[in-house]
Image (cartoon, grey):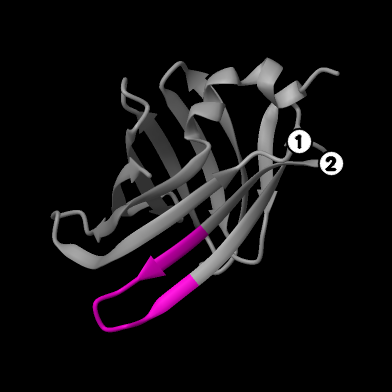
Amino acid sequence: MSNPLLDLMPQIYDHEGVWTGTYRHVDLDGQTLDFHKSRVECIFPDAGDVVYIQKNRFEWEDGRVYEVEFPGVLVDDKIYWDTETFSGYGWQSGENVFLLELDRKDLPGARFHEAIVIGPDRKTRARTWHWFKDGVCFKRTLCDETKL
């Protein structure tokens, strides 16, 4: 039986597993707005409509913890998400690059564009988000992750 996601985006399976690292949100001058540790689990179910699940756990130095899960479905050759905080889609744009365009529901008028670049060793990756509100970039997010 064929796996449509595997047929369409074979390199995305290099992201499967648990990634730990940091997220740093910066303003347009490069000043840190927020910094926290991350644990991101990427899961590719074998059956069903959901083709991708991402489980995030974020921890701040002050003890705050935030956990969330994002299921994605395959539509028009892209992975689509529609969650409480965002909606949008992602696609494999090259052997080492996965791109996302997401509209924020929790911040009206805001969206971000994310590039996930996996290293040649398939054990490290860098992610950058470019945040726009009403068409103007207002911050960026920088993520550095290592696969467990």
Q: Residues within 10 Å of mark 2 (few under 14, many from 20)?
A: few
- Identify which residue, 117 or 112, lies in the foreground: 117
Characterize the local packing of mark 1: few (<14), some (14-19) or many (20 or more) Cα atoms within 10 angstroms.
few
**Residue 139 appears at what percent x and percent y?**
29, 55
Would you name the residue on which mark 2 appears?
48
As displayed, is residue 14 above or below residue 59?
above
Q: Residue at x 70, y 16 (%)?
A: 7
- In percent of width and height, residue 91 lies at 58, 29
* Residue type at the position of mark 1: Asp
Q: Going 77% across and 22% down the picture, which residue do you hit? A: 3
The tally of labels here is 2
- What SS does tag 2 mark? loop
User: How far apart are the alpha carbons under marks 2 and 1?
Assistant: 7 Å
For residue 13, which numbered disc appears in the image?
Answer: none
Q: In the rendered view, would you say 67 is above or below 17?
A: below
Q: Nearer the viewer, residue 73 or 88?
A: 73
For residue 59, what is the image quadrant? Answer: bottom left
Figure quadrant of the N terminus: top right
For the record, the magenta segment spans 56-66
* Residue 74 located within the stretch drawn in magenta: no
- In x, y percent, where is residue 89? 62, 40
Split into 4 quadrants, where in the image is the C terminus?
Answer: top left
Residue 50 at what x, y percent from top left? 76, 44
- Name the element at disc 1: loop
The answer to whether marks 2 and 1 mark residues whose Cβ atoms lie closer than 8 Å is: no
Number of the front mark, 2 or 1: 1
* Residue at which label 1 appears: 46
Q: Residue at x 27, y 59 (%)?
A: 25
Residue drawn at x 28%, y 56% as measured from the top left: 22
Nearest to the observer: residue 90 or residue 41 = 41
